[in-house]
Image (cartoon, helix red, strand yellow):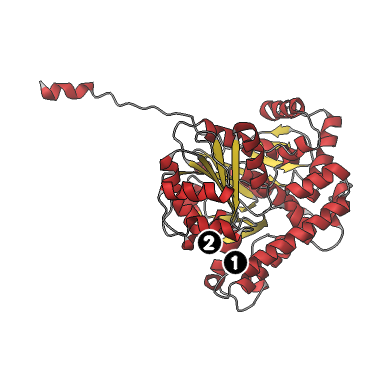
């Protein structure tokens, strides 16, 4: 059974004082339903699963009144067994298929008899169909494919080994050369296999990359079917063309997505909904240009300039022509895998909690990623080849005093090393690049005693 970090976040929701429904969002086939089933087995006496995509009868529960008593009566009738208040979890799976179920969450949570988890793959895509959101009655959790740390655990890497690697990262000391070599090989395997749970499980069980590739091609076909099914108002063809163009666009020297490469007459506003569809569906990750690498990055974003990464690097490999997977598994990064390496870093940074941005300026050059941790902005360069010490743009941005950047990371094949403000990290240590977690509580009280003088 694959170990998922989302389980810890679901546990935290379960322990929470303020009871809300938990809404788990993410792309198709990334393991949302599976992790809920695992959680239910160990925490509840009763578990009810309504799949609105596969079972049309489940929609009928919400056809009439949405008051709690009517809904609970319909639920118990549907499952044909009594449900134990306080010890029952009800899963609304693929909730985007039944907008009225999403509307009913408010009344069911207020009722308090049962706990509720919703999962959705195309929530942003189908949001217009929801008449009234249960604002204040949902807690949101975003899920992604397995990250590299989860992939390591799936392949038998012990938590103590990961803790030792984290210590090397934190102390900025080199990893044992033999360990470093093994971790690089495992990272190359992750680049090929990716993080889709079914693909990872097949690789763990068989170590047959050909079987993993066959599953990946099936998932790509599923995503294309989703585009044809859900994209509206004639946008399906545009969304499909954008999706299919991602590998070639990333192979371009500057990685930037250029619409003219799809259609010389294409206009950004005509394709905007297609890009949004792919992002909302979780199959693509946008990385926006920032005009200045200063906080807040969002205020400096130029949304008309962006890179578009695939949501899973294994799927990017499967969509790339040729048998590049076997070159990667042999550690042969002399082939042109810069786009794949940059994609895997984007996938890791996003799942770790960073927004994706890059910087490109004629005067200073291009930096692959710019991430923000609180008020601190950090440039990140990705190097797939052996020239990881060549990064002129990085030196340029670090030299600008008013940008106040005192550290930069270069992710590469080399071991941990520091050179002034530049820290060289092995590619696999991307898993340790995370924003500082928000405090559990932040109590702040203003001393108003000075105002007492005004009342005397």
Who is closer to the viewer here, 305 or 156? 156
- All told, the count of numbered labels is 2
Q: Is residue 282 above or below residue 410?
A: below
426 relative position to 243: left or right:
right
Image quadrant holding the N terminus, namely top right
The image quarter in which residue 214 lies: bottom right
Vertical position of residue 275 compared to residue 455: above or below:
below
Residue 180 place in picture, x, y as percent: 82, 33
User: Residue 230 bears which disc, if any?
Assistant: 1
Residue 1 visible, this angle: yes
Query: Residue extending furthest left?
Result: 456
Q: Earlier in the sequence, mark 1 or mark 2?
A: 2
Q: Label 1's element?
A: helix
Percent x, y of residue 331: 86, 46
Locate residue 290, reporting x and y percent: 54, 54
Image quadrant in which the C terminus is located: top left
Residue at 66% across, 69% down? 240
**Of 219 and 87, the residue lying toward us:** 87
Q: Is residue 380 visible?
A: no
């Amino acid at each position: 059974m694959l170990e998922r970090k989302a389980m810890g976040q679901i546990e935290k929701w379960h322990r929470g004082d303020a009871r809300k429904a938990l809404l788990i969002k993410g792309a198709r086939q990334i393991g949302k339903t599976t992790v809920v089933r695992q959680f239910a087995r160990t925490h509840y006496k009763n578990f009810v699963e309504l799949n609105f995509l596969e079972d049309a009868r489940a929609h009928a529960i919400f056809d009439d009144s949405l008051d709690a008593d009517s809904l609970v009566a319909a639920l118990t009738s549907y499952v044909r067994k009594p449900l134990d208040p306080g010890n029952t979890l009800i899963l609304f799976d693929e909730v985007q298929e039944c907008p009225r179920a999403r509307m009913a969450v408010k009344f069911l949570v207020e009722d308090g008899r049962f706990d509720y988890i919703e999962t959705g793959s195309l929530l942003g895509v189908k949001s217009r169909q929801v008449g009234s959101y249960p604002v204040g009655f949902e807690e949101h959790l975003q899920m992604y494919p397995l990250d590299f740390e989860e992939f390591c655990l799936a392949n038998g890497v012990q938590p103590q080994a990961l803790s030792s690697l984290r210590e090397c990262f934190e102390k900025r000391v080199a990893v044992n050369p033999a360990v470093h070599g093994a971790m690089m090989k495992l990272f190359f395997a992750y680049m090929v296999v990716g993080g889709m749970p079914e693909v990872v499980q097949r690789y763990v069980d068989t170590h047959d990359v050909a079987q993993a590739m066959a599953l990946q091609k099936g998932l790509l076909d599923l995503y294309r079917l989703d585009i044809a099914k859900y994209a509206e108002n004639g946008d399906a063809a545009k969304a499909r063309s954008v999706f299919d163009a991602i590998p070639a666009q990333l192979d371009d020297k500057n990685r930037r997505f250029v619409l003219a490469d799809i259609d010389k007459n294409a206009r950004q506003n005509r394709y905007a909904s297609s890009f949004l569809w792919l992002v909302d569906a979780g199959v693509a990750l946008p990385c926006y240009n920032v005009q200045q690498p200063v906080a807040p990055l969002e205020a400096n974003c130029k949304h008309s300039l962006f890179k578009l990464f695939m949501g899973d690097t294994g799927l990017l490999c499967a969509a790339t022509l040729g048998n590049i997977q076997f070159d990667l598994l042999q550690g042969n990064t002399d082939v042109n895998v810069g786009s794949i390496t940059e994609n895997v870093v984007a996938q890791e940074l996003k799942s770790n909690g960073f927004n994706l941005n890059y910087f490109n300026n004629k005067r200073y050059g291009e930096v692959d990623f710019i991430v923000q941790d609180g008020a601190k902005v950090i440039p990140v360069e990705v190097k797939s080849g052996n020239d990881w010490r060549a990064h002129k743009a990085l030196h340029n941005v670090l030299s600008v005093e008013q940008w106040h950047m005192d550290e930069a990371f270069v992710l590469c094949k080399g071991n941990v090393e520091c050179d002034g403000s530049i820290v060289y990290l092995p590619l696999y240590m991307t898993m340790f690049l995370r924003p500082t977690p928000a405090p559990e509580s932040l109590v702040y009280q203003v001393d108003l005693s000075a105002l007492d003088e005004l009342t005397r």
